[in-house]
Amino acid sequence: MAERELVTSCYIYAQGGCEPQLEGHTAANFRMGNDKGVLIQVISHCIPFIGYPRTLNALAVINKVAEKQSK
């Protein structure tokens, strides 16, 4: 399930403009055991394929969700 959630997040991240959906899937990744470091590694790996702007958007979402969960 953790791998499936990770792949789903990657697809959403690659589409761009889906930040609200990405927020939900980022939270689901955290629940499945994929931590912030894993998600950052995945989006970093995708930079050449997806582009820098979408990567920055995904990073902002990951940071936002991680901050919410730490409160």
Image (tube, rainbow, N blue to C red):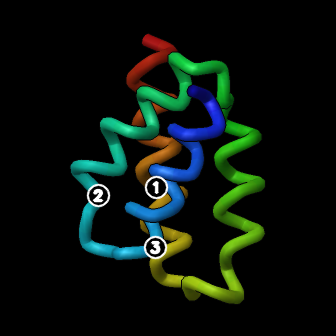
Residue 8 in the image: above or below residue 70: below
Q: Which badge, 1 or 2, comes first in the chain's sequence?
A: 2
According to the picture, the residue beneath numbered tag 3 turns out to be: 14
> Tag 2, which secondary structure?
helix
| Location of residue 4 in the rendering, given as x and y in whole percent from the top left corner | 56, 40
Q: Quadrant of residue 64?
A: top left
Q: Which circle, 3 or 1, is nearer the viewer?
A: 3
| Location of residue 66 in the rendering, given as x and y in whole percent from the top left corner | 51, 30
| Location of residue 5 in the rendering, given as x and y in whole percent from the top left corner | 51, 38
Q: Quadrant of residue 69?
A: top left
Q: CA distance from mark 1 to mark 2?
A: 9 Å
Residue found at x 36% / y 75%? 15
Residue found at x 69% / y 52%? 40
Residue 38 in the image: above or below residue 31: below
According to the picture, the residue beneath numbered tag 1 turns out to be: 60
Residue found at x 56% / y 52%? 7
According to the picture, the residue beneath numbered tag 2 turns out to be: 19
- Asked if the residue under mark 2 is in contact with the one under mark 1, i.e. CB atoms within 8 Å, the reply is yes
Q: CA distance from mark 3 to mark 1?
A: 14 Å
Q: Looking at the picture, which amino acid does disc 2 mark?
A: Glu
Q: Looking at the picture, which amino acid does disc 1 mark?
A: Ala
> Tag 3, which secondary structure?
helix
Q: Looking at the picture, which amino acid does disc 3 mark?
A: Ala
